Image (cartoon, grey):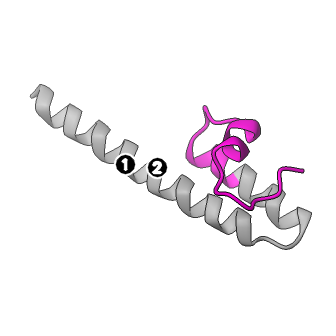
């Protein structure tokens, strides 16, 4: 019974990681500050423990860190 829970947690973690990486790419492509703010808010909904600084710190190269 423990394996089911662990599998579920691993799947959720992987899905969350994929979504955060997708949002980082969208952030890199965003042109306006409004878009960037909306993407950061969405990232915090997907992963509540992540802060804006953490989100930007591990963003791909070439992303503005205003």
**Do the CB atoms of the residues marked 2 and 1 lie less than 8 Å apart?**
yes
Q: Nearer the viewer, residue 39 or 24?
A: 24
Whether residue 35 sits left or right of residue 16 in the image: it is right
Residue occupying image coordinates x 9% and y 28%:
1
Residue 49 x %, y %: 60, 31
The vertical placement of 42 against 48, above or below, is below
Q: Does residue 56 show up magenta in the picture?
A: yes
Q: Is residue 33 above or below residue 29?
A: above
Residue 41 percent location from the top left of the image: 74, 50
x, y (%) of residue 61? Answer: 68, 58
Q: Label 1, on which residue?
A: 14
Residue at 39 percent of width and 42 percent of height? 13
The image quarter in which residue 60 lies: bottom right
How far apart, in angstroms, are the residues tagged by discs 2 and 1?
Answer: 5 Å
Along the line of sight, the residue nearer the viewer: 59 or 55: 59
52 over 27 or under it: above or below:
above
Circle 1 packing at 10 Å, graded few (<14), some (14-19), many (20+), is few
Name the side, left or right, on which 13 lies relative to 49: left
Secondary structure under the numbered disc 2 in the rendered image: helix
Residue at far front of view: 61
Q: Secondary structure at mark 1?
A: helix
Name the residue located 70 percent from the left edge and 41 percent from the top edge.
57
Res 17 label: 2
Stretch in magenta? 42-66
């Amino acid at each position: 019974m423990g394996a089911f829970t662990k599998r579920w947690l691993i799947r959720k973690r992987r899905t969350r990681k994929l979504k955060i990486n997708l949002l980082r790419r969208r952030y890199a492509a965003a042109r306006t500050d409004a878009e960037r703010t909306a993407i950061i808010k969405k990232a915090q909904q997907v992963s509540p423990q992540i802060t804006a600084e953490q989100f930007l710190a591990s963003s791909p190269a070439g992303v503005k860190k205003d």
